[in-house]
Image (cartoon, rainbow, N blue to C red):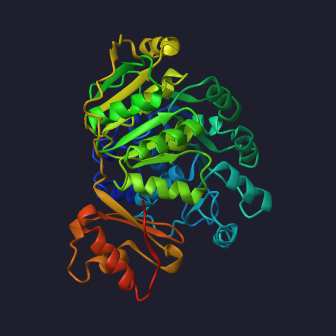
Amino acid sequence: MSANVFSALPLRPELQTAITTLGYREPTPVQAQTLPDLLQGRDLLAQAQTGSGKTAAFAIGLLNRLDALAYATQALVLCPTRELADQVTAEIRRLASAIPNIKILTLCGGKPMGAQLASLQRDPHIVVGTPGRILKHLDKGSLQLGTLQTLVLDEADRMLDMGFHDDIMAIIDQTSPQRQTLLFSATYPAGIKAVSAAVQSNTVEVRVDGPDTGPEIEQVFYRLEGMDRAEALYRVIGHYQPESCLVFCSTRQQCQELAEGLRQHDLHALALHGDLEQAERDQVFTQFSSRCSTLLIATDVAARGLDIKELALVVNVELSRDPEVHIHRIGRTGRAGCKGLAVSLVSAAEHGRLQAITELQGCEVELQSLPDDQAARGFKLYPPMVCFSISGGRKQKLRAGDLLGALTATAELSGTQIGKITLFDNCAYVAVEQKVARQALAILESGKIKGRRFRVRRLR
């Protein structure tokens, strides 16, 4: 890409307008390195971390070649989780805002098939979804991919980790062989090369994020010395007392046990793992991303695709067997120019994993003794916000503005005391400051939202 501006790219005028309106000025490294080949229709295999701008890169590419007058599915983006699919859809919608009559549809599990079947009565231009649900629609004949121009496999490594290989290959079998295939992955395991070889041709390979974690992330490695990991984690949290902390575990059971242990210390900790129903996952992530919970204990697969801004601390309760996964984990902090902190607990049995991490990063690390327990004794860590669940969502025609208006109509609360508002099909979540939580609950319970009464519940 010549210069370092989007205007140098051969893009349709509507896309240039949207890019300017969104305030995108200089392309990120992944955009600068992938867009020239992407816009020429070449197959691409790119290693890029979450938060690198890769979504905008492939969204620009697929929108640039889209024919809005042709009512056929021309682009498909496969994602490992519904959360990531929702984020990808939102980004594509923003970039497509200046192109009239573009139909974008999200097809994920955990949603009723009936509503999706109704939406598919007219073919969407772009589909974003998870492999299992996409395959169900293909089996039913409600989705056709014979006219597909662009196929994107986003977070491809995690889709393989989650066992979606056969589903992905079955989906690809129903696409046009003349399609462009874009494969994005945060790590680069052998399985990715195998998939690329099977579904791509004349592939351009791009590695954007090297193993260096960057100067904005401080890494601390603590030696486990005759102490269980739960107590060590509590001591770490008590020492740093972060405003937000993402804790990585290897198993669902460990994830749940640690969250319960921290709650016994009167800390607001939530667990995110594969045993949760989709509605539970939505609620947990909404609470954490809305700053209504300070601690999120998650497995790697469950945390994949979660867009969490201003994350103060990442803790690895145990080291990953894959050093590239370690790099991906700690890359969740220190994003967007903010300083980050990553803490890892290391047992004697994990020294081999630690050596693999140091070799990948190209630097030595010093194992430190855990901080003493003085700071951890009796400390409290309260989230700044409280989250309320409302028994109505998009299907009840609720909008974020309706909830904000209901809360501020009496002038008891100001808009600055209202935090993130998240809408789903049949429920909504709104965050408010702790100090006005009682007032907010009283307003929501006694008043009406858009002329109707809804059940309101304060989340714990």
Above or below, comparing residue 364 to residue 29 in the picture: above
Please identify the quadrant where the N terminus is shown.
top left
Direction from residue 224 to residue 117 in the image, left or right:
right
| Image quadrant assignment for residue 435 | bottom left
Q: How many marks?
A: 0
Direction from residue 168 to residue 181 in the image, left or right:
left
Above or below, comparing residue 292 to residue 429 in the picture: above
Above or below, comparing residue 211 to residue 168 in the picture: above
Name the residue at the bottom extreme: 451
Q: Is residue 126 visible?
A: no
Image position, residue 255 (x, y; %): 53, 39
Q: Is residue 289 visible?
A: yes
| Image quadrant assignment for residue 199 | top right
Image position, residue 443 (x, y; %): 32, 80
Which residue is at the front of the view, 451 or 197? 451
Image position, residue 411 (x, y; %): 20, 80
Which residue is at the front of the view, 18 or 215? 215
Q: What residue is shown at x 63% (from left), y 26% (from top)?
A: 193
Please identify the quadrant where the C terminus is shown.
bottom left
Q: What residue is shown at x 28% (from left), y 53% (from top)?
A: 23
Image position, residue 80 (x, y; %): 59, 45
Which residue is at the front of the view, 368 or 14? 368
Q: What residue is shown at x 49% (from left), y 44% (from top)?
A: 260
Above or below, comparing residue 360 to residue 265 in the picture: above
Which residue is at the front of the view, 455 or 239? 239
